[in-house]
Amino acid sequence: MIVDIETIDEFLIHRTSDVEAAVRQAAATEIMPRFRQLAAHEIDQKTGPHDLVTDADRKAEQYLTEALTALLPGSVVVGEEAVHADPATYDAIQGTAPVWIVDPVDGTRQFVHGDSGFCTLVALALDGVVQASWTFAPARDEFATAIRGRGAVLDGAPLRSGSPVPGRDLDVATSHPDYTTDAQKRALVGLWVDGVVTRPCGSAGLEYLAIARGELDAVAFSWEAAWDHAAGLLLVEEAGGAHLTLAGEPFRITGGNALPFTAARDAATARRVMGLLAAGA
């Protein structure tokens, strides 16, 4: 049945499952056949040896770009690989058209090394506000969806981030030192205190999922790229969590955030982590 879509709300009522199907098909067609099967010529560096791209990234993004804009005519796509090729593409996040924010393989380094810790991230935003998100870890067969104001689910079951157990150390995943400025390193050092256990992050999307399911207490990140954060931040919000920047404001996908920022299982934990980051800054 063809449905005439007039608003984003109507789209999300009628077509959310179609978006999920497109994400799953992109993974089945372009990502998983290459998992642990990549040839050397299918892997390239972008900005350096820690910033990799593969044929799976490029082809999955192309598939999603075509599929998602067909589902929502008039929408545009901001994808990690397209922005790398043409940075001006990123400006669409500031525009008035509905925008799909796509990271075809979040955790490319893990993907290249045959580790299952990668995912596909898709978010739908309007006027700079994320309205819905889809997070798919195909090697683990886990699919999480969030719709603003309607909650978050993982494989159909509601997600609840809950709160850290009082008296236990906070588990916090942080930006890898390779991707931080000296000032950001000083801020992150603020987390090196009793009561906090830190580790470098893996796939940002999967770290956000871990917060949403109550397995990780918080993250502290130092970069703004919307494709890494848009889907996961909504997932955390709709599971009951919160996020704050160094300015004490929620993170904005349109940019201009005071970094680093945190996302956490609840508002109190977000404030605690941000206080430590501010003390170190």
Image (cartoon, helix red, strand yellow):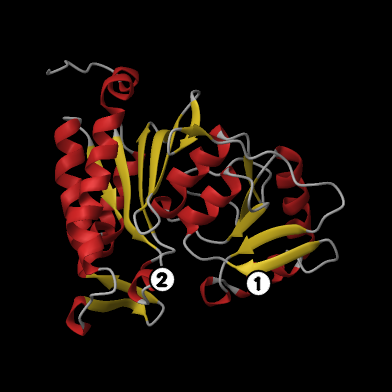
Residue 48 image label: none
Q: Residue placed at 55% from the left, 36% from the top?
A: 159
Q: Where's residue 225, x and y in %?
A: 43, 56
Q: Which quarter of the image is occupied by the C terminus?
A: bottom right
Q: Is residue 69 above or below residue 194?
A: above
Residue tagged 2: 115
Q: Where's residue 48, x and y in %?
A: 37, 81
Q: Is residue 115 visible?
A: yes
Q: Residue placed at 33% from the left, 74% from the top?
A: 112
Q: How many marks on residues? A: 2
Work out whether mark 2 precedes mark 1 in sequence or the reverse, and give the earlier one.
2
Residue tagged 1: 185
Snapshot quadrant of residue 84: bottom left
Snapshot quadrant of residue 18: top left
Q: Nearer the viewer, residue 244 or 13?
A: 13
Q: On the picture, is 270 further left or further right than 201?
A: right
Q: Residue placed at 50% from the left, 39% from the top?
A: 235
Q: On the picture, is 44 further left or further right than 144?
A: left
Mark 2 closeness class: few <14, some 14–19, many ≥20 residues within 10 Å:
some
In the rendered structure, which amino acid carries the disc numbered 2? Answer: Asp
Q: Which quarter of the image is occupied by the N terminus?
A: top left
Q: Nearer the viewer, residue 188 or 139?
A: 139
Q: Is residue 201 above or below residue 129?
A: below
Which secondary structure lies at badge 2? loop
Q: On the picture, is 48 further left or further right than 201?
A: left
In the rendered structure, which amino acid carries the disc numbered 1? Answer: Lys
Mark toward the viewer: 2 or 1: 2
